[in-house]
Image (spheres, rainbow, N blue to C red):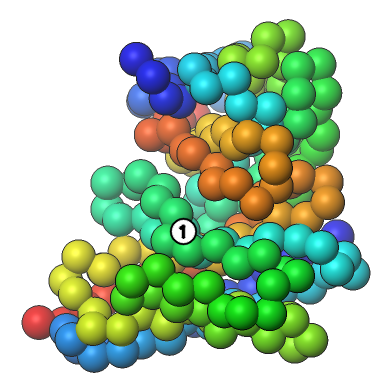
Amino acid sequence: AQTVTQSQPEMSVQEAETVTLSCTYDTSESDYYLFWYKQPPSRQMILVIRQEAYKQQNATENRFSVNFQKAAKSFSLKISDSQLGDAAMYFCAYRGSQGNLIFGKGTKLSVKP
Amino acid sequence: DAGITQSPRYKITETGRQVTLMCHQTWSHSYMFWYRQDLGHGLRLIYYSAAADITDKGEVPDGYVVSRSKTENFPLTLESATRSQTSVYFCASSERPRGTEAFFGQGTRLTVV
């Protein structure tokens, strides 16, 4: 069975600074997808970024980028120029051949003004 | 309304009662999912469905039943509610390609007393 691990329950960053959230996963599959979702206090789940395992190039979306290390099964999220609106829970997720979408336990990000 | 909707938004029930949480999506997405979110556990997959009449267990299926007779609906039933099932429940849906985004409902907060 696949698992997703987020080892940082909480993180804090100063406004305008950069922060990196960690995620590791375990799978025997070679073809899969990885996602980062953001959950603000409203509880709405918002897709931040996605990565296809067969693409070596790291995905980027504006201030958000990932460091995808397939061999190490690592998928970290970097947030540049952090903004107050980035404060939220961040979830790493894995989707494999069965189509099921598995999440980590989340990292609560605080942004200090 | 277009999108994915859950009902009810809030529910209080007694131990031992049967309760059904509804999920409806208007996109004709193939995949649908049910998660529970608990502090310290992130989102845990209860059941998922790849198409009408096809359902599979997730990480925590015990005590829950699902059905999917129509593509757009995916109800989750707690046959005999227990206090440990007090949680926030999220329904989600996605199109068939596994790399596509999953869209989430607003969640149902269930309290079992």
Name the residue carrying label 1: A37
* In-image side of B65 versus B104 (left or right): right
- Residue that protrudes farthest toward the right in the picture: A28
State the residue at coordinates (37%, 55%): A39
Subunit that carries the residue with mark 1: A
Q: Secondary structure at mark 1?
A: strand
Q: Quadrant of the N terminus of chain A?
A: bottom right
Residue B103 % position (x, y): 49, 39
- Tell me what residue is drawn at x 44 percent, y 54 percent: A47
Up/down of B10 relative to A66, above or below: above
Instruction: Characterize the local packing of mark 1: few (<14), some (14-19) or many (20 or more) Cα atoms within 10 angstroms.
Output: many
Instruction: Say which residue appears at 61% left-offset and 26% top-offset.
Output: B29
Asked whether residue A86 is in view, the answer is yes
Q: Name the foreground residue: B31 vs B48.
A: B31
Using the rendered view, name the quadrant where residue A92 is placed.
Answer: bottom right
Give the residue drawn at x 30%, y 56%. A40
- Counting every numbered tag in the picture gives 1
Frontmost residue, B113 versus A99: A99
Q: Which residue is the extreme one toward the top?
A: B69
Answer with the quarter of the image where residue B85 lies. top right
